[in-house]
Every structure is written in C-alpha cells, then in structure tokens.
Image (tube, rainbow, N blue to C red):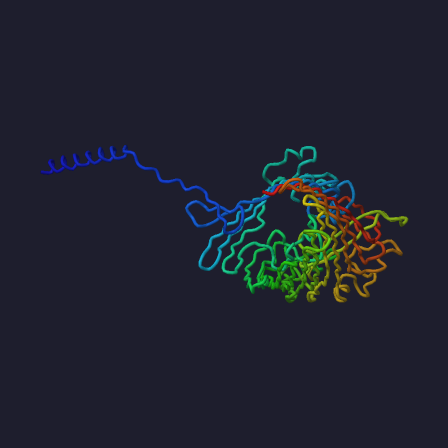
Amino acid sequence: MNLVKSLILGSTAALMAVGGAQAADLPVKAKAVEYVKVCSLYGPGFYYIPGTDTCIKLGGYLRVDVVVNANSVAGPNYNGAGGAQNRFTNGYTWRSREDLNLDTRTATEYGVVRTYFDAVFTYTTDNYGVNSAAPGATVYSPLGGGGAVAPASAPGNASSGSGTAGQVGVYFAFIQFAGFTIGKAVSQFSAPWTNYPGNNFDGLVGGGGASTGVNQFTYTAQFGNGVQLALSAQDQTGGYYQAGVNNLSAGGAYGASDYAGTIAPDFVAALKVDQAWGIFQASVAAHDNHAAYYGATELTGHPDDKWGWAGALALSIKNIPTGPGDTINVQGAYTNGATRYNIQDLAAGMGAQQIYSGTSLPGVYQSVGIAVAPDSIFAAGTQQQLVTTWGMRGAFIHNWSPNWNTSIYGAYAQVSYNDTAKALLCGIGGIGGSVRLTLASAPGTGLTACNPDYAIAQLGTQTQWTPVKNLTFSADLTYTHLDQKYSGLVAAPNAATAKPVALYEMKDQDTILLMLRAQRNW
C-alpha cells in the first residue's frame, strides 16, 4: 500500500510540473507601461513619479568662479596668508561647482507635503599656505586642510584624503508640512536675499547670513495678503551663529574661543509682508553664550551663561521708476552678544582680521590692522562681557536690457567693546598698558591708544550678462576698508605667514577683490 501511494503521489507531482511548464509557455498580456506625466500643480518642471501621486522637480547649476586677489572664494584677503600680502598671498583662487537639488511635493488633506534637498560637488584650487612642518615651504591646501604636496605636483593631487581638492556639501535638506519646516533651511532671521542684496560676493557685513542653511524647527503662520509670522528654534553651532566666547586666560591678544557643550538653540521670530510693491521683514533672535571653564579642570570654575540678542529690518522695493525689474534692497541689524547676525558666517574673516601693508615711519617694518569680533570675552574669575555691533547693507539693481544688469552695493558695520572688556584687553587705563597685545619692547615705543573697537566699510559693483536663457556671465568688484582704533607700534610677528619679529605700525587697511563667474542653471 505504501508503494502504491508513493507511485500515485509521484505521478501527480510530475503531471503538475509538466502542466506548469506548459502554462508558462503560453502568451501573457504585458502590463501597460506607466509613462512620466507632467505635474502642473506646482509650476513648470514638475513630473509625477510613476505609480505615485508625488510630483518631483530636478534642478541645479554648474558654476565656475575665478576670484582675483584672494586666498579663498568666500572673501578678500583679511587674514592668514591672504592678509600677509606677501609671497604666500594668492593672485587668484579658482573653483568649479555642480549643484543638484530635488524638490518633491504631495497633496494631502493637511496641505502639501514637501521635501527639498540641495547638494554641491566642488573642486577648488590655488589655496597656498605655509607648511608649519617645514617653515618657509608652501603646501597645496585646496580646502584649508593639510595636504603636504608641493605646488609643482599639486595638479595631480585630486584624489581623496586630506589634500583633496574635491568636496561634497549639503546646503539644504528639509521637510515642510502643515506650516512646519523641519531640517536644514535658510534661517528665518535672514533677509529674503540672504547675503546678496545685489552681488555674488559672499562676505558683506550688515545682516545675518547662513545662505547654505541651518538646522531648524520652524512654524510659519499665514495671515493672508502676503503676511506671515515665523517662529523658529535653530542650531547655533557649526560656525553659523557662534562668533566665539573668548577666554583671555587661554593666551593671545584676544584669547581663544572656549565653548562648552550645546545647551540651547537660538530662538528666532520673523514677521514678513510680501506684496506687489515689495517685501518688508522684521526679525529678532535670542542667542545663548555658554562658555567652558576658566582653566583645564572643573575646579577652575566658569562664567555664567549670558543671553545675547539681535534684531534686523529688511526692505525690498520693486518696480521703481528707473526701469522694469529694477530693485532696491536694504537691511539694518543690531546685535549684543550675537555677532553672527551682523557679521555673518561667510563674512567671518571680517570678525578676525590681521591685514598687513606698508608704512612710511622710519625704523618700522610694516603696518598692520587687527580687528576681532567675538560674541563675548572673559578672563579667569570674571563674567562674560558681550560685544555689541550694528550694521547695514543694501544695493540698487538696474536692468539695462533683458540681457544686461548692473548693481551698486555697499555695507557698513561697527564693533564695540564695553569698558570692562576694554580693561580686560588693554590693561589699567586702556592706554598701552596691555600685556595681551605684544607691545614693542624698545624704549619709547608701544601703543599710544589701545582700543579694540573697529568699523568695516564695503563698496562694490556687479555687472551681469545673460546672452541666452539660464546662462550668465558676471564680474563683481568689491572694495573693503578696515577702520581700526588702535594707534602706535606693536611687535606682531606671524610665523605662519613668514612675518618677522619687528616693529609694526597700527594702521587702517584696505583690500580689493574681483570675482569673475560663469553659471549655467538648469
């Protein structure tokens, strides 16, 4: 019986296998192909992702910048090898960049759900500096890193590693849903044009920046007729909104920034009115300055936290009588213990300047301008002293024709230390009594006025030519003047830029930058 059962089961299995094989050979009607369809709900360039109700748009640009008289593409020669104005100072810096952004949107019962991502692929060359391991030698350091490659072999140094010239960055990555913005996006404090009232140059003072986005959790209430209010908690770290809590006990003329751990985000509120005539925006921000210990251990103690704040007003006037599309953009900012909301992250070099040039004084090697703008300063046993700034920036943009436009732009900022801060930096009386600034040791020399306050003035012009749609060539010329308040002589060597130990005259400084750009948007 068992043998018969086995034979029957085996025969049945064989017949099923044959039947299945024959069925597989029969022709089957192919499933209809789902073609990509245009999504007209959110403007041109959107398409439905096949098989979903989500629309997607791809975009980006390819950009090439050549910046003349700069050791970086973000700003003029304010410090380091650039500010040295010697053989380590670049005649130019060159950058090529591809930007890719993805925008997805889905209609729901709660409104549109949006995600946005923007990444950049960058190749930068010609940033030379001094090799600290071999003083006097130069190294190829395209990203500010430590590639130990001589300039002669630099062109081949494009592989991964510390000396690579290639870099990938994330500008934006956020979700928007039911009035909320969650992720890395432009700060709600920033003016609608962020750092660019009428320019390509990144380093204007006079308002908050973070044009590459900052992590945030924001709710935006819409009141109709173009009026909205945004309430935001945003990350202050990563250099975007931390200018430094400088511990003078760490040594050096201005000490060193000495942050403790992350405790509180920055809190921002912004009211915006966007209508046919233009845009008005009022922004405020609260910023916690959370310093570490006075010394190396917990036993040394620490200063209390101090909250700083910032406020800004921005105005854009459209369709002015000078021509179609002409625009005036202007912004003003005031900060106390929140310096980056005025001297923004891409203008950070203007918050820590050391610029050298010539002098006419006999027996003096060169002149130098020194200017530093942290959020606060403190020394052992003292509390944080907040630094105050105010500034403004603006531009007038004129369209000569659909293919040509020119802008004139400018910016100004002042940095002020209170009396206690000046006493900490300059010593008793504040007149040449400082041991923090390395004074000339020769008899009869030294600072005749020790005042860390300073001002920055900038003036520029940009012209753009767009011969065909989405292809633009531009030239952007920027002049910067440092008005520093020190006077007298100092011994201010900078071994990192081959500056010798000698007498230097404290003096106002000037620098100029030319940015040439070609950009194709797609």
Furthest residue to the right? 362
Q: Is residue 19 left or right of residue 333?
A: left
Which of these two is toward me, 195 or 105? 105
**Where the C terminus falls, by quadrant?**
top right
Decide: is 382 above or below 511.
Answer: below
Task: Name the residue rendered at 84%, 52% in the picture.
Answer: 505
**Where the N terminus falls, by quadrant?**
top left
Decide: is 140 above or below 419.
Answer: above
Measured as percent of width and height from the top left, residue 153 is found at 67, 33
Task: Name the residue rendered at 51%, 47% in the picture.
Answer: 46
Q: Is residue 63 left or right of residue 440?
A: left
Measured as percent of width and height from the top left, residue 461 is found at 75, 48
Which of these two is toward me, 124 or 35? 35
Query: Would residue 351 be seen by someone viewing this image from the given angle?
Result: no
Measured as percent of width and height from the top left, residue 255 is found at 71, 57
Task: Name the residue rendered at 83%, 53% in the picture.
Answer: 507
Measured as percent of width and height from the top left, residue 139 is found at 69, 39
